[in-house]
Image: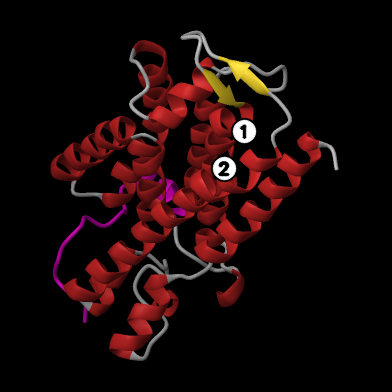
Amino acid sequence: MPYRLTIILFLLLFALLGYLLGSVNFAILVTRWFTGRDVRNAGSGNAGMTNVMRTAGFLPGVLTFLGDFLKGVAAVYLGKYLLTGLLVPLAPETVITESSKVLDYAAAVAPVYGASVSGFFCLVGHMFPLYFGFRGGKGIATTAGVMLVLDWRVFLIVVGIFAVSVLVTRIVSLSSIIAAVCYPVVTWLCFSLLPSSDAVNAAAMSAYHPLVIPLRWFLTLVAACFTALILYKHRDNMARLRKRQEKRFSLKKNK
């Protein structure tokens, strides 16, 4: 089988695995465990941390966040390292980096594609879960988990923007929208102005292949896809924000 086709088939496999992992929605599972109810039929109807805190309490909200965050982390690690282990033995050629080190093409570039594909489809699964009638959450915690593994610098900056916005406005949806819009911008700036913080990304940046676009543009495009999905899932929130009807965040449990 041609090597490029092998890469495509493996990426499709990891897209499926990422989607199935993302479909495990912790907001629904945790709320059923604590209250016996479906969180989608309570509060705002969203299967996410904020609505779980409002309807089930602080501890269920924290458990929901941890579950959704860690599945994003797991999805990226799955695509980043397992894909490389599968492809390296099949690589037919090597490439020379600018530093004159010989690297397998698969070892240099495949982890970035595998991590991005698996992480993105984990978000798709979270938003449209196979196991729960395709009615999921809005993906903020899962995106944060994916972001952390792809590049911790981007994670810290975007989470910092989110945190400052929450402190100022106390509106989680608005802060999520602002952070999502900043995500691709911060990604481009980090990979354009600063050396890569990740050895895998650094190798991919210096590797050459005619089918590979510059890494900063690829990862910026991936980030923009995350942003587009998050904005789509927040369309009702944006309508309420325009009408000044969006609720402010509180740790108090709604009756």
In the rendered view, would you say 73 is above or below 169?
below
Front one among 30 and 244:
30
Q: Position of residue 195 (x, y in %)?
A: 35, 16
> Is 227 left or right of 173, judged from the image as shown?
right
Task: Kindly indicate the quadrant of the structure image that contains residue 154.
Answer: top left
Looking at the rendered structure, the secondary structure element under dot 1 is helix
Q: Confirm or deny contact between disc 1 and disc 2 (CB under 8 A).
A: yes
Task: State how many labels appear.
Answer: 2
Which label was assigned to residue 84? 2
Report the residue marked by disc 1: 106
> Is 144 left or right of 252, judged from the image as shown?
right
Front one among 34 and 51:
34
Give the quadrant of the N terminus: top right
Front one among 15 and 233:
15
Residue 136 appears anywhere in the view = yes
Q: Residues within 10 Å of mark 2 (few under 14, many from 20)?
A: many
Q: Position of residue 47 (x, y in %)?
A: 41, 68
Q: Position of residue 174 (x, y in %)?
A: 32, 44
The answer for how far apart the CA atoms under marks 1 and 2 are is 6 Å
Q: Is 76 one of the magenta-colored residues?
A: no
Identify which amino acid the numbered label 2 is placed on: Thr
Q: Earlier in the sequence, mark 1 or mark 2?
A: 2
Give the quadrant of the C terminus: bottom left
Task: Kindly indicate the quadrant of the structure image that contains residue 117.
Answer: top right
Magenta segment, which residues?
Answer: 236-255
Q: Is 239 one of the magenta-colored residues?
A: yes
